Structures are given as C-alpha cells and as structure tokens.
Image (cartoon, helix red, strand yellow):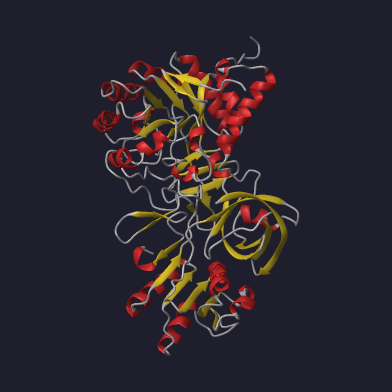
Amino acid sequence: MKDYIATIVKNEKIAENIHAVTFDMGEEVAVRAGQFGNISVGGTHLLRRPIAICKVEGRLVTFCYQIKGEGTQKLKTMEAGTRLNVLMPLGNGFFVEENERKVALVGGGVGVFPLISVLREYGAQKEISAYIGYRNKGAVCGVEEFEKAKKFAGVTDDGSYGAKMNAVQAFEKDLKEGNRPDVVLACGPTPMLRALKTLVEKENLLCYVSLEERMGCGIGACLVCVCDTTNGAKARVCKDGPVFNANEVQL
Amino acid sequence: MANLSVNICGVELKNPVIAASGTFGFGREFNELYDIGQVGGVSTKGLTLEPRLGNPVPRIAESRGVILNAVGLQNPGVEHFIECDLEWLKNTGTCVIANVAGKTLDDYKNICAKLDGRVDMIELNISCPNVKSGGMAFGIKPESVEEVTRVAKSALTKTPLIVKLSPNVESIATNAKAAESGGADSISLINTLTGMAIDIERRRPIIANNTGGVSGAGVKPIAVRMVYEAAQAVKIPVIGMGGITRAEDAIEFLMAGATAVQVGTANFTDPYAMPKIIQGLNAWCDSRGVKNVSELTGTLQLNGK
C-alpha cells in the first residue's frame, strides 16, 4: 500500500454512465485481483473515492467507475496529464486456490470490473465461466475481456443484449446443465449477491463476494464501512474485505 | 530545527500533533504507511466498558468541505484494548491518549479506574453526537460536564484527564470552566457539530443514523473561535481541533490558545497529513525564527486592541 501520485493517461466513457480512467503510476504496482484504490479528486471533496482496480498493465492501472455523485462527476472531466493521489492497492482481493480449477464469475452493474481483474489474473490457468448481467444494451461493457473466458454469458434485464435474465439466473441455468464450478466469485448489487448466496447455499458451492460500502479512511482505521458477519460481529469492508466468503457475511 | 515539543499537564509530547479519536483506530493501520511514533500523540478510538457494534451503515457522507459521520462508538471494549493494543501502541513511542465514553457516571468512573496509570492521558468523550444515551447528554449542560468530570477524576490518581467538549452548546466558555471546576487537567475541542445530509432522490438522510457529526476543513473557523473563547476562560491547557489540514491551520489554533492540536478528517483525505503537518510546523517556525513551537500558544492579538 502506497499513496501514488498518478498521472491520467486516458479517461473516457465506455458505456452508459460508466467511464474508465487509466493512470500511469510511475512504477510497476503489484496488485491482486479484486483489490481497489482510493482516489482523491481534490478540491472540497475530503473523502477519496474507493474504486475497484480493473486492469494492470505494467505501470498503467485502469479503474472503471459509475458517474454517481459530485466526486465522480468531477473525475469524469479530468483530462490526460492530470495528477491525482491514488492510495493502493487496498483490501484483500480474490484468491483462487491451486485445487480450484473451474471458476464461475457472477457480476452485475459496476461489479463487473473487479471480475475482469480476476479473468486477467487467472484466465490462463483456470477454466473460467463468466455470467454477467447488465441493465440494458447501453450498459454493456467489458465484453472484449469477458469473451476471453472459456464461456461468457452476457445477459440483460430487458433482453436488449443476450438473454432476458439476470446474472444469477444465467449462472443457475448453466449449473442445472451440469457446468458446476469449484468456486464462485461475485460482485454486484446487493440484491444480486443475496440471490446468489441463497443459490450457492442450496447447491453447497464455495462462493466469495466482493462488497461495496461508503468508506472513510479506506485502510481499516475508522470503522465506517462495516458489514455484518454471520457470527454477529462487524467486519471492515475496506480492510477485512472487500472480498468475503459468502457464508461469513449477512447480505 | 525548531523545538516542537510541548508539555500538557506534565506529559511531554515530541510535537503538538495528535491523531484525533475515531479517525486513527489504535494506530496499526496508519503504521503500515509511516512510523506513527513520529506523531506527538494518538487519541484512541472511543473505548467503552463493553464492546459495542456501533450504528447501521451508511455511517458517512460528504458535503462540500466537510464530512458527516455516525459510527456510533464501535469498539472492542476497554479490556480488549488493554490486552491487545495498548502495549503495541506504547512501543511505537507516541503518547497514548485513551478516549473513553460511557452511558452512566459509573461507566466513566469504572473505565477511568481500569486505565489509570496505564496510559499517558485519558480523554473523556462527553460529546459524541452519535449515540442515543450518554455521550453527548453529559456534554451539554455545564452542571453535568462538571459532574462527569469530577466522577472520572475521582477514579484517577496517576493519569491526567482531558475533557473533550461538544460545540453543540450554549456557551463553550461556560462548559470549559465547568470542566476545569470538575478537576479536568486539560480540555480538548471541538468535537463534531451535529448535521444532516439528504439524498434528494430517496428523500432520506444519507446516513442511517439520520444525523451525523460534521468535521473537516469547513468547520475550522468555528473551531478556532471556540478554542479562543475556551482558552480565554480557563487556566488549564487546551487541545484544539476542527478542520486542521495543514501546518498553517495548526498554527492558527496554537495562536488562539491551544497547546497542542488534533488532526482527524485530514487523515482520510491524505493519510500522510500528520507527518506533513509536523514537517510544516518545523519549517514555519524555522523561517520565522520561532525556536520553540510552545511560544506560539495564545499569542493572538485581537484587532482594535
């Protein structure tokens, strides 16, 4: 973990309301799939924006972000050459064990981007199937990455791209057809993760979920971004997570 | 090199910059970024007798120049702190200030008794705006400020007591005096100002607790004014805080009457904020020929006088 002074090399729209920003970090950064960076947009914004790392190529690190509030509105307008402080890599990330050969990725919304980092890290060694849900055709992104998976099911809520279903339904359909993974890695809206948790519990599948929460420090000190664990305690999303075993957290 | 050390009620700090409670945990996470032993002091996450799970999420929101938080005193309990974190924190070389909170007078007494002689200072949190009972209830009326201070002080024979004051009061000077009358060795201020931020799409407050404590750069002028008024009212040393982001901000507080300062929200904006402020204090003092930073305390001259 280090606070990099990173220079924007590219910042562009990649889908409806979604932008991708690529930074030159000034040096190579070792990142595990599923980790995130805490990006300072400066000015009157005192909190940084915690955003999942999507791609790492040498010194270049790409984050994809949804335009949601004033901070991301501001980030959207920043041009190549702008220098920002980026504290990274943060959080535990996804980890696929040696004996887990078949990996299922289940993602929706902005949750698809940390899954791209999984595909890039493990794509060559593992047999990966990606079940990715989008709201509609305009929201579709990352396809060129997901198509590198052994299997890619891109679906939409309204059927304007792929089948009309959600990511969990796409995964369940394949599961029923006999494509059973050794581990499921997921990131997306809470209702999606909740539905997935119910399914994996019924099917007795190992599943890790990456959670999102409003954060303060991003490094585990302030106890702002907590989630409820199944044993009645609190865990810090930024430091103990963002990736948790699905049976250890309440969704 | 200016001499940055300061003395607060007999406790020597290597510099006047203290991590504010609730923004720094027990120091372990920031110690992954820099040696926290270089910081003058660390005021711990607010400790209670029993562990607390705190409030539901979201616990934080942002508004221009400030943030709002309502963590609700999530902490592992004082015993856990003593067993698992205290020695480690002492060994870093920073001054350990245990921030404590209670629901009843007895809670404050018992928790102080457990920590007496074990930490460098105790900071009484009577001004947390984010818990339903206790906390801020003690911090509003001067009579109860004095009473809770007296009760806490009665449990302490070795460790100096700092009372942290709420800004959400009628008169900060009166409450500062009340703490002094109750036997406080020092006062610290300001805790957060109670505020609200609304998500207009959902027509609901962003924070689950509805209201939260406002802190950050935007509250600084209010804090400086209150520190000035409190420092004028008491003889005990004052620790100032509220929106300190740069060395120049810290100097304002010192001039207004503070002996030391605390830095909170700035740790979120820039995790290296405190080492930078310490360096900046040194540079400022050197460039102005100030040999001891403690010379700055209370040197403010009001206009027209």
Q: B286 left or right of A197?
A: right
User: Which x, y percent locates residue A181?
Assistant: 43, 81
Q: B230 left or right of A84?
A: left
Residue A67 lies, with reference to residue A203, above or below; the image says: above
Q: B213 left or right of A7?
A: left
Please give the count of numbered marks on the rendered protein: 0
Quadrant of the image occupied by residue A17? bottom right
Q: Which residue shows up at 42% across the image and 56% down it?
A: A240
User: Which x, y percent locates residue A165?
Assistant: 50, 82
Q: Which residue is nearer to you in this view: A4 or B93?
A: B93
Q: Which residue is nearer to you in this view: A26 or A7?
A: A26
Q: B148 left or right of B273?
A: left
* Most distant residue in the top direction: B305
Q: Which residue shows up at 58% across the image and 27% down it?
A: B250
Residue B95 lies, with reference to residue A229, above or below; the image says: above
Q: Which residue is nearer to you in this view: B95 or B197?
A: B95
The quadrant the C terminus of chain A occupies is bottom left
